Image (cartoon, rainbow, N blue to C red):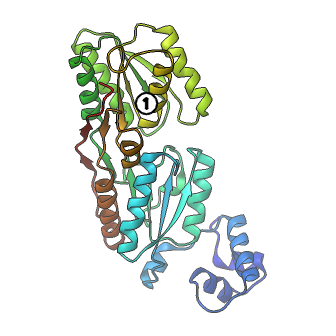
Amino acid sequence: MTVKIDDVAKLAGVSKTTVSRVLNKRGSLSEKTIKKVYDAMDELNYRPNVIARQLFKQETKLIGLIFPTVTSPFFGQLISSIQKQLFNQGYRVLIGDSKNDSRIERKYLQELLAHQVDGLIVGSHNSGIDEYNNPNMPIVAIDRRVNDDIPIISSNNYMGGLMATELLIKKGARKIIHTNDPKNLVGPPQNQERKRAYVDSMIEHGLTPIVYSIDYNFSDSKKRQIIEKIFQEHPDVDGMFVSNDVDACRVLNVARHLGYKIPEDFKLVGFDGADLTKITVPDLTTIVQPIDKMAEYAVDMLIKRIKTPSYGHDKMFPVGLWNGETV
C-alpha cells in the first residue's frame, strides 16, 4: 500500500499542511513538531515525491554522500575533494559513513532521501539496496558498481594491477603474493580487477599466483595476524602487491619487524596513492589513483544528471606510479 502525506499527518497528529511545510522547510515550526513529522515518516517508511518537488522547482541544494569509511586516506581525500567541489557549486553535503555495513548504508540512504537531497554520490560496497533503484534520484557511483543505471567513476584498476605486478617481476621478485578483498564482496568490486591483472601477469611469466583475502571489516589486529600468517606460510616470499596502501603499510611494518631488508629481500607495491600516504609513508611504492580528478568529474556528472536525469556514462581514469623505495 502506498503511504500518503495524509497518513503521515494522521500518525504525527498534525495537519497535512504542517507536514508539507516540514518537507519543504517553509515557515516557522518547533523542533518538537518537526521531529514528530520525521518520526512518523520513518515509522511509515514514507518517501517524499521527488518528481513533485522537481515540478515545483524546490531545490534543497543538498547532496548526500555515502562511503564505507571516512578514515582511510583514499576515501578521506575523495570525500574532502567532493565536498570542496560541491561547495564551489553552491551545494552543501550530508555525509554517511556506512562502515561497509548494508544496514547502516540503507539507514543513511533513507535519511538522506527524507531530507530531499538533490542527488547522491556513493562509494557503496553493498548491493541489494532497493532505495538505489530510484529513477527520480540523480546518483553517481565511485569505484563501485551500484546498479546498471548508475554511472561509475573509477580508475583503471586492471592496468594498475598489471603495473604493480610487472614492476615487481622486473625488479627480480618471483614469489609474489597478492592481498585483496574477499571474492564475495559485491559489485563486482573494482579491485577484483587488480587481482585479475595480477593473476594474468603471473601466469604470463610462468609464475604461480598466490592470493590472500583481507576483509575490509577486519580489525587492525586481525589484519596483522593474516599478514603474519602469510610470512609464516611463505618465508621465501620476495614480493607483494597489496590492494590498498593502508594494508601495504601494515605489510611493510611486519616485514621490517621480521627482519626482511627492504627492498633487497622483499619488495612491496601498494595501491591508491592518496596525498596523506605519500606524505607520511613516502618510501612506499604505490599505484596512484587520480583522486581529485575523479571527485571533480563525479561532481560535474551529478550536477548534469540533476538537470538532465538521462545524462550519465561510465568514466575510467588512467593510473600512475609513485616511485618509493620499497621496490
- Image quadrant where residue 165 sits: top left
Q: Tag 1: Cα neighbours inside 10 Å, few (<14), some, or many (≥20)?
A: many
In the figure, 112 relative to 67: above or below?
Answer: below
Figure disc tally? 1
Q: Which part of the image, by quadrant, shows the C terminus?
A: top left
Residues 259 and 52: in front is 259
Residues 158 and 247: in front is 247
Per the image, label 1 sits on a secondary structure element best described as helix
* Residue depicted at 59% across the width and 61% down the height: 110
Residue 303 location, x and y as percent? 34, 69
Residue 307 location, x and y as percent? 33, 73
* Residue depicted at 70% across the width and 80% down the height: 34
- Image quadrant where residue 197 sits: top left
Q: Which part of the image, by quadrant, shows the N terminus?
A: bottom right
Residue 17 location, x and y as percent? 65, 89
- Disc 1: which residue: 248
Q: Residue 310: tell me if it is visible.
A: no
Q: Residue 86: tell me if it is visible.
A: yes
Residue 149 location, x and y as percent? 37, 53
Q: Amino acid at mark 1?
A: Ala
In the figure, 55 relative to 327: above or below?
Answer: below
In the figure, 143 relative to 229: above or below?
Answer: below
